[in-house]
Structures are given as C-alpha cells and as structure tokens.
Image (cartoon, rainbow, N blue to C red):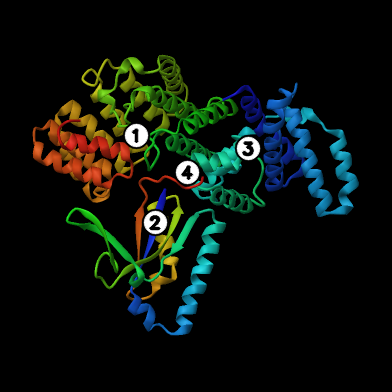
Amino acid sequence: MKFLLIMNINPKVLESLTEEEQAAIGAGHGDFIKEISASGEMISTQALADPSASVTVRAVDGVPTATDGPYVEAKEFIGGYYLVDVDSKERAVELAKKIPDAGIPGLGIEVRQVMFEAGSEM
Amino acid sequence: MSDVEDALRAAVPRVLGALTRRYGDFAACEDAVQDAVLEASLAWPQEGLPDNPGGWLYRVASRRMVDRIRGDEARRRREALAAARELPVEAIEHDDTLALLFLCCHPALTPASQVALTLRAVGGLTTGEIARAFLVPEATMGPRISRAKSKLVGARFAPPPEEERPQRMRTVLRVLYLIFNEGYTASAGERLQRRDLAAEAIRLARMLCEAAPGDGEAAGLLALMLLTESRTAARESPDGTLIPLAEQDRSLWDRDLIAEGTRLVEDAMLSSALGPYQLQAAIAALHVEAEDAADTDWAQIAVLYRILNRLDPAPIVTLNRAVAVGMSEGPQAGLDLLRQLEPALERHHRFHAVRGFLLDRAGDREAAREAFLDAARMTASLPEQRYLRRRAEGTG
C-alpha cells in the first residue's frame, strides 16, 4: 500500500531552531532516506520551497487568475513529502515517527493513503 | 504466457534448488538464476526453445556461480571449474519447490518481502516485472529483494522440522493468497484487476499442491483462488465499476474453473483436517452454484462463517457472517451482529458498506445513504468508490 507522508512545517518554528538543531534535522532526513531505501519502501521524496514564494491560481469571476502568495493564510504549510510503499497503515505510521520533524513541537506528519496515480515511470 | 515464458518459469525452482544444494549460498545462487532467466528471455525467442530448458538455465547459472567464486576466492578456482565441468544436469530433476517456498516465506521477512522474493525465486519473474505488477519503481523493488535475501543468510535450505511445519505452511499459504488478492482486487487505484498476478498466484498454488500432496489447506487455497477467479469476467463493467456478486451476469462465469475448484474443495474436506482456506473455498462454492443471489444457501454460508470464525477469529469474518445472517434471518439480525463489530471496524470501509446494504434491505433509505457515503469516503479503490456512491444515491 502506498502512503504519502506529508510534512507540515511552520516556517516560524523552523526559524527559531538553532543551527545545530537544523543540521540535525538535515542529517536525520539523510539517515531516514538511507533506511527506507535499503528496506525497499521508498518511492520518492520532495522538499518544497518556502510558501512565501508561491503563486496561487484561482477563479476570479470565473476566470483562472494568478495572485502572489500561498493558497490559504496559515501558519503551517506542506514542506515536502515522502511517498512510500509499505505493508500496512501501521508501518506507514511507524515510518512517520522516524522522520525528524515528528520529534519537534509545532511540526507534524500527516499519513495519507494513495488512491490513484499516473505518470510515474515504473 | 508464451511457450518460452512457460518453459522458462516452470524450470526456475528446480534450477535454483539444484544450484543452492550444490553451492549453498542461496542469495548468490538466486542472483545467478535471475541472470540466467534474463539471458534466456533474450536468447530463446531468437534461437528457439532448447531441448532441455532446465539444463540450459542450470548451465548458465552455474557458470555465473563459478565466475563469482573465482572472483571471491581464487584458491577455490580449480575446484569450482571442475564442478562446472561435471554439470550434473540430472540434479535438477529433484523438486525443491517446497523447500524454496518455505525459505522465501521465512517468518523473519515482512509480508511484502516474502511476496517479492517468492515471485522472483519460485515464480521466475524478473525484478522489473514484479515492480510493474506492484506499481512501484524497480529502484524500490530491487533493494526489497536484496534486503530479504540478506536476512536469510544462515537460514536452512530444507523443509522446516515437523513441529514448525504447520505454522510455516500457514505463512506460505498466506503469501500466495496475498499475491492472488493483489492481482484480484488491487488494494488501491484505478484498475480492479491485475490479472497476471492472479494467474501467477494460481500457478504457484498448483505447484504447491503438487509438492505437498494431501495438504488439505493447500488444496483449499487453490480451490478458493479458482472459484474466485471464475467470476472475473463478470465483476467489472466496461467503465471500470465494480459489479457485486448479486448483480453479476452468471453466464459469464467460467464453468471449468468452478468445476475444478468445487471438486478440489470437496475432496480436501473429505480427506483432511478442516481449515480456513477450505471453509472459504466451500463458501465460494456455495455462492457460485446458486442460480442467483436469492437462490443462494445463505443459512449454510452463515454456518460456515461461524465455524471459520472459531478456527481463525477475525472481525472481517463476522462482518461477512452478518451479510449471510441478514440474508437468511432478515436484515435486523445482521445489523444486530454488526453492532458488536463497530469498535473494531468503524474505520474500515467494508463495515459501512455492509451496514448500508443491510439498512437498505431494512427499508431505512436515509441511514443506508449515509452508510454508503461513509464507506465511499474510506475506501482507497476508485472502482469501489464509484459503486458505493451509486448505491448511496439508490441507483446502484
């Protein structure tokens, strides 16, 4: 079963971390990637740029219109994700707990099952 | 499957078994056989089938092993070369299917790894084919198989001791059933059936039955697969929507598979100890021998589910029994049974689908609609979701 482990980040929380703490997060992700690649559970991962640089396209008077900024005004944004293929939802949750973000107050991982996909090279 | 593929894959377990008995290193032997399979899949369509496909594979795989041993330990070169020159092709006459299945379905491995390794080492599929069947990249499947093999270092290549055998056999059966189910109802996604995997699971189950004659549960599993597979042509509409059993065009069912499956399960139940797969096959047989849903012997099915729940208790078994009870004793009796399942299954889409079905039969349209919509939200299968939404609107 495939799950998306969605990392919700709060830029304020990340900025408040010390340099060592941020480096530890980076190293933790490196270890996590190594571990789930070796176990044959990793499909892909992406990290996203800061939401302040986003452009949002939405209908204004029925016409798709671009405006600067993220889709919703919020404190938390999607910072990136891991796409994994695992035996069970329980295993997906177990993996989510290993992501360094899961140990930092104010950040969190949403575990969500994949229902349909197309376009990836298999 | 083409003739070349048939011959190739049928030979794989014997070749791998012979090689492993000779060289001992299962992981390396398995790689060597995979190389030989890839080589054969290129050579045979061009040059035609060799007279002895197993012998051909064995020679190529042996050469790989010798190359490897040469690289690893130069001092063993002479010994290895001598071994390769002998080429005792008769070694592959020994059927190691059972020992290989036990090894690939070793309890130290995760279910996903057991499935992948079984398909490669016993089924003779390539890593790429397995990856495509499970809709993951080869870069995911390759390490999964390597990791599984590295966990097996030191594991015996022989059937397990008598006292462990029943438990180990249960794992083998479960792995084959997982492969079948992945093929029959993809756990997620657009396509309801990935037929090749179902066919492969049936082929492996046939091999298991040949290797373990008299095992009632192996026969029960094969029967269950055949009886389920018999309905394939009828279970999906042209637009990809799931068609439930009760609404299927029964003239599309495969009578040969039904006859074979029914015979298998009847023989197994007469000649060996009762087990969960025989019971599920017996239930499947009762479904397919009925003229229509109303003609189905629901009371008997309810009894079989009750026995199944005693042998192998699981909430999902009680859920199935609730349908049978609802059909034989009235929807309220089924709904009463459901109530005790709520804590265990309230986040499972099938619980809500069954609830919707029973509420609908009880005449409570509004509650049925809510239940079907809950079920539609919880499933990760698009064909199922389409069907459940249709039921919610009362048009399914």
Label 1: which residue?
B308
Q: Are marks 2 and 1 on the same chain?
A: no
Name the residue tied to disc 4.
Answer: B135
Q: CA distance from mark 2 to mark 4?
A: 15 Å
Q: Which residue is mark 3?
A: B99
Chain letter for mark 4: B
Nearer the camera: disc 3 or disc 2: 2
Looking at the image, is mark 2 or mark 1 nearer the viewer? Answer: 2
Q: Using the image, determine if residue A34 lies above or below residue B193.
A: below
Disc nearest the viewer among 3 and 1 = 3
Judge if badges 3 and 2 mark residues of a common chain.
no
Answer whether residue B318 is visible to the viewer in this image. no
Name the element at disc 4.
Answer: loop
Task: Decide if residue B182 is on the left or right side of residue B172.
Answer: left
User: Marks 2 and 3: in contact by CB < 8 Å?
Assistant: no
Amino acid of disc 1: Leu
Mark 3 or mark 4: which is in front?
A: 4
Q: What chain is tagged by disc 1?
A: B
